[in-house]
Image (cartoon, helix red, strand yellow):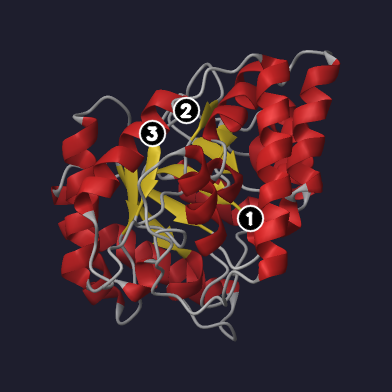
Amino acid sequence: MKTTTKGFIPVMLTPFQNDGSIDFPALTKLTNFYLEAGASGLFANCLSSEMFELNDEERLAVIAHVLEVTQGSVPVVATGTFGGPIPQQAEFVRRVHDLGTDAVILISGLLADERDSDEVFNDRVAELLNLTDHIPLGFYECPVPYKRLISPEQLRSFVGTGRVIYHKDTCLDLKQVKEKLSVTDKAHFGLYDAYMVHAVDSLKAGSAGLSCIQGNFSPELIVWLCENYNSSDEEVQKVQQFLIDNMDVMHNVYPIVSKYFLQKRGLTISTFTRRNVGVLTPEIYKEVERLYANYSQLKGELDLKAVY
């Protein structure tokens, strides 16, 4: 996952029909939308995908479909741990890997309980590594069921095995991100930051790219930031400030709000979600209208060519 250029890896949505079934034709369009926006990889079956609301066969079907659409054009990573004994989790990791994923992602909060020590967590990781042969792995500090952060020292040890090639960081702490980067400077490894408040500084510090929910509104903006972060141009600061200023509306009743935004952009996707995140109130609708207007203005100023 380490590249010489910075890249954006979207945390993919799962489109549903209005009856709650997976909308695979819409998933095809959505996957191509990310690719045409310039995504350098895809994170399928993640929290934004409503992975906890899918059963095992649906998870595998979604991942397989994304792989079929991409046809190897970009790396695809996907979650493979959903709780239970480590041997059980290792079995599903193998099933996800066998589909053809480039790395299988481990949810840090599902490898040990919240009250468990780092030593317990480390032992569970070692056990899972031992049970999954040479499968490339990654970590995601997912906020569900609880956010378990991985320390720089732990990450150094895991990356040092040669098995861990990806890390989606959600610590929200630039100092800690820099510490993680300083001890994991390996050719095979990439850290992708989820926090847009310090996105530019994280990219300058050495992160491999970004992996954020804002990319489910305007992926081409995140790609642009990854390509232009090192410029002193005022436009870089303008893009980051746009993402910061609109963070609240983008997180409100997510992922419903992002699906509605994509509808406004012209993508055929229902706002149906299996997660209980609330509803689009009249006030939220107004906020999304303002967001869309501001996005359209910024896109024009940057002369971005968007698919939708």
| Residue occupying the point 47% across, 34% down | 189
Relative to 295, is 37 on the left or the right? Answer: left
Q: Does residue 272 sit above or below 228 in this rendering? A: below
**Residues under numbered marks 1 and 3 in contact, where contact means CB atoms less than 8 Å apart:** no
Question: Can you identify the residue that label 1 sits on?
Answer: 170
- Three-letter amino acid code of the residue under disc 1: Thr
Local crowd size for mark 2, using a 10 Å CA cut-off: few (<14), some (14–19), many (≥20): some
Q: Does residue 8 sit above or below 108 in this rendering? A: above
Relative to 291, is 259 on the left or the right? Answer: left
| Residue occupying the point 78% across, 41% down | 198
| Residue occupying the point 18% across, 47% down | 65
> Is residue 91 in sight in this rendering?
no
Disc number lying in front (1 or 2): 1
Local crowd size for mark 3, using a 10 Å CA cut-off: few (<14), some (14–19), many (≥20): some
Label whose residue precedes the other's in the sequence (3 or 2)? 2
Q: Nearer the viewer, residue 81 or 223?
A: 223
Label whose residue precedes the other's in the sequence (1 or 2)? 2
Relative to 211, is 85 on the left or the right? Answer: left
Q: Label 1 vs label 2: CA separation?
A: 18 Å
**Residues under numbered marks 3 and 2 in contact, where contact means CB atoms less than 8 Å apart:** no
Mark 2 residue element: loop
- Three-letter amino acid code of the residue under disc 2: Lys
- Three-letter amino acid code of the residue under disc 3: Phe
